[in-house]
Amino acid sequence: MSVSAEITKEVEGEPRLVRALEQLASLLVPGEGIEAFAVQRRFFALIHRRALVAATTGRLIGMQRGLFGGFHPSSVRWQDLKEARVDVGIFGARLTVSFFGSPDLAIAGKEATLTFPGLRKSQAGAVYRVCQAQDQAWREKRRVRELDELRAKSGGIQLGAPGAGAGLALPSGGGQDDAVARLERAKAMLDKGLISDAEYEALKARIVNTL
């Protein structure tokens, strides 16, 4: 799979980086495209070849090339992304991504981190913006997924229009132990940022009213 002309233009005059982008493009699956990329500055790669990180339509791909050829890729699916940070210094930018190891929608699971130091500042910013957009989109999907799981476990939370818990409803009945368990699950969702304070209070009030 070839690199788009727009992407190639950004590394015009740097044949090694053009080849690195072509290597990265060879990892893309059909229908996947590069939205932004960042290259490590030469100053940060005195004893190794410069690293490359790219944000595609489906994942984040990091690539470290060997001194004598070959390359070692690592990737993070957007649905597994937990957080992305960029720290901009005088000489370059550091991109750090934290992600879950879950095979599904990354609601839970072991966390891991990838760090890409010394990136060109403007390019790192472009990759970071894609990460943020994907994080927000998948955060909402995980939120809906966990609400669905809470509904199934507690016997019928219904999702409706968003806003201050207006779309959350709990069935009447159930013992005190069941109510405590539902309160604990709702608090866990609040701690993870999957529901707002207002939605948590609405859930809590409905659970208490079933006692």
Image: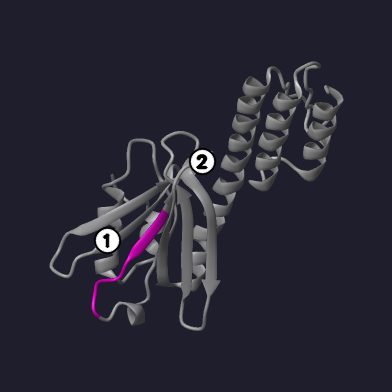
Magenta span has 49? Answer: yes
The quadrant of the image that shows the N terminus is top left
Q: Is residue 16 visible?
A: yes
Q: Which residues are magenta?
A: 47-54
Disc 2 element: loop
- Kindly report which numbered mark, 1 or 2, lies closer to the viewer in this rendering: 2
Task: Name above or below for residue 64 compared with residue 119.
Answer: above
Q: Which residue is mark 1?
A: 20
Disc 1 element: helix
Q: Residue at x 63, y 23 (%)?
A: 153
Q: Which residue is mark 2?
A: 108
Percent coordinates x, y for residue 58 in the rendering? 43, 42
- Which residue type does callout 1 highlight? Ala
The quadrant of the image that shows the C terminus is top right
The tag earlier along the polypeptide, 1 or 2, is: 1
Magenta span has 110? Answer: no
Viewer-proximal residue among 177 and 78: 177
Q: Is residue 123 visible?
A: no
Q: Are marks 1 and 2 in contact (CB under 8 Å)?
A: no
Mark-to-mark CA distance, 1 and 2: 34 Å
Q: Residue at x 41, y 36 (%)?
A: 103
Q: Residue at x 63, y 39 (%)?
A: 140
Percent coordinates x, y for residue 193 in the rendering? 67, 46
